[in-house]
Image (spheres, rainbow, N blue to C red):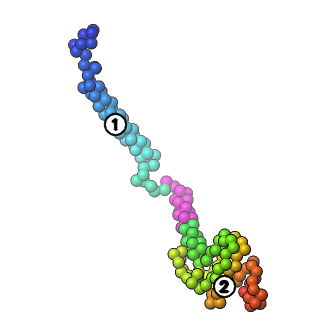
Amino acid sequence: MATPSGEGDDRSSETYHSKWDKFAKDEEASLAAEDAALAAQSDAALGLSAAADAPRSDAEAAERAKREALKAAKQLFKDKDMAALGSKLVIADEVGASRLLTADDMAADDMGGEKHAVHIKGAKDCTYTLDALMRVAKVGRCRLNPALKALGICA
């Protein structure tokens, strides 16, 4: 029994405090488990459980089907866009360059297959010479040798 002077009072001991710390942790874990069980029961009653991922109505089923079709169409568009980008040789933002573009520049690379078009963007004071072995369909908005213009290559 504790005396008024505090002698024999076990509330100051480490054992006493660790007992209550353990009790508090156990109660907190018990309450968390109870809350989780109540939330799962509530979700199941409302049909919101993760296991029941089925649509709740015909309208929701139609919406999900539409969303999946849009995802597939978007992926198809991305694949087509990447294939188109992979078939272009893009030369961008060069200043004062002088280059000979050959058939080797049009060869396959890591972006896809063989290149079929040359796109020059943002070039300033540059000279690009196209090798005679390259298959060129059209060259637009540039100053060409008059002999090439006579051949109908330049638009």
Would you name the residue on which mark 1 appears?
A: 29
Q: Which mark is residue 53?
A: none
Asked if residue 49 is positioned above or below residue 99 in the image, the reply reads above
Tell me where residue 99 appears, x and y as whole percent: 65, 80
Along the line of sight, the residue nearer the viewer: 24 or 150: 150
Along the line of sight, the residue nearer the viewer: 94 or 136: 94
Q: Quick one: label 1 or label 2, which is nearer the N terminus?
A: 1
Q: Residue at x 72, y 74 (%)?
A: 125
| Marks 1 and 2 in Cβ contact (< 8 Å) | no
Q: Amino acid at mark 1?
A: Ala
Q: Residue at x 62, y 90 (%)?
A: 133
Does residue 108 appear anywhere in the picture?
yes
Tell me where residue 150 appears, x and y as whole percent: 77, 90
Q: Amino acid at mark 2?
A: Leu
Magenta-colored stretch includes residue 111: no
Disc number lying in front (1 or 2): 2
Tell me where residue 80 appears, x and y as whole percent: 58, 73
Question: SS for tag 2?
Answer: strand
Q: Residue at x 71, y 72 (%)?
A: 124
Asked if residue 45 is positioned above or below residue 145 in the image, the reply reads above
Left or right relative to 126: residue 86: left
Along the line of sight, the residue nearer the viewer: 52 or 116: 116
Would you name the residue on which mark 2 appears?
A: 130
Alpha-carbon distance for marks 1 and 2? Answer: 75 Å
- Span shown in magenta: 56-73
The quarter holding residue 89 reads bottom right
Quarter containing the N terminus: top left
Tell me where residue 28 appears, x and y as whole percent: 35, 34
Quarter containing the C terminus: bottom right
Other residues around mark 2 within 10 Å, as few (<14) / some (14–19) / many (≥20): some
Other residues around mark 1 within 10 Å, as few (<14) / some (14–19) / many (≥20): few
